[in-house]
Image (cartoon, helix red, strand yellow):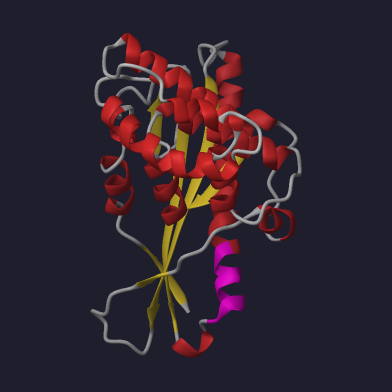
Amino acid sequence: MDTQHASPSLWQQMIHQSFLSLYELPADKTTNPEQFQGYDFVFEFSSAIIYLIVNDVVMRASRQKVDSAQVREWRKEVVNQLIKRHAQLYLKNDRSMAESNTSTAGKDVYFIGLTSLSVVHQDDKPQASSHTVDYEYGSQFFAEDCVLDLDDEQSVLQVFSHQNFVDIISQLVTPSDLSAFLDFHRSQLTGFESFQDESTLLTQFLQSPDFHQRAIRVQEQLIDNQLIDQIEQRLLKATEPDQAVFAKALMLRFRKILECGTSCLIV
């Protein structure tokens, strides 16, 4: 078995097909001494900054060796590489920023690690395409296989698979929603809360009363900008107790409205 790195266009494609493309800092701005240096991508919102590092790996292995146990070992290897890299970058930057007395201007800071794992079978022809491995992590993975440093909540690396993160940003279509989810995800990690996988956590977040209260505030801004006439009564109803099923159905409708509105409104 050996490894090779996948094309970097994988990540550029993810960014360009989402709202993140509007907030990606160009290379000349990522060298600002007030920013953390060395991360693959940086996104700056009105109230948050996201530092993103990626690790996309293509494994070559015989068909006989590709099973669930082997995939688990590969995932551990890919994530541990990210954790080590982030730890080195953060330590180097933290010292540098402390010495120069700089800060992040009061914005929330999130460190995100994304992984992509594909397999090419050694017995296939050389030009054969790779097979993407779909997976998620969940709290148990980070408790048993790849232990995160949770001592400093603000420096925690939040790890997602590529496909999982693509799904997340397709459902959270504003910077404020993404920031809120990242804050929720980080609190689950640092609070040692158990969750099956990141998709389950996203569903829990989307159905929470807090999310729908945020959605109401967004619609209020859309009203102020004359993009809609009034707040949907069904959205107000979704904030009531015991309305989880109704809220889930409404979320699908609200997402369409929000996608229309965010082209004119930056949240």
The quadrant in which the C terminus is found is top left
Question: Residue at image x 36%, y 90%?
Answer: 123
- Quick check: is 68 in the magenta stretch? yes
- Residue 251 on the magenta span: no
Q: Which of 3 and 224 is in front in this view?
A: 224
Residue 120 % position (x, y): 37, 77
Residue that appears at 52% across and 41% down: 246
The residue lying toward the viewer, choosing from 18 and 89, is 18
Position of 21 relative to 202 (above/below): above
Let me know if residue 36 appears in the view.
no
Q: In this view, does 161 lie above or below 252?
A: below
In this picture, is 63 found above or below 166? below
Is residue 104 visible in this depiction of the protein?
A: yes
Please provide percent x and percent y for residue 11. 33, 48
Quadrant in the picture for residue 23: top left
Q: In this view of the protein, which residue sits in the foreground, 36 or 141?
A: 141
Q: Position of residue 96 (x, y in %)?
A: 56, 22
Q: With 260 as the anchor, is 185 left or right in this view?
A: right
- Magenta region, main secondary structure: helix
Query: In terms of image quadrants, where is residue 18?
Result: top left
Q: Give the range drawn in magenta.
A: 67-75
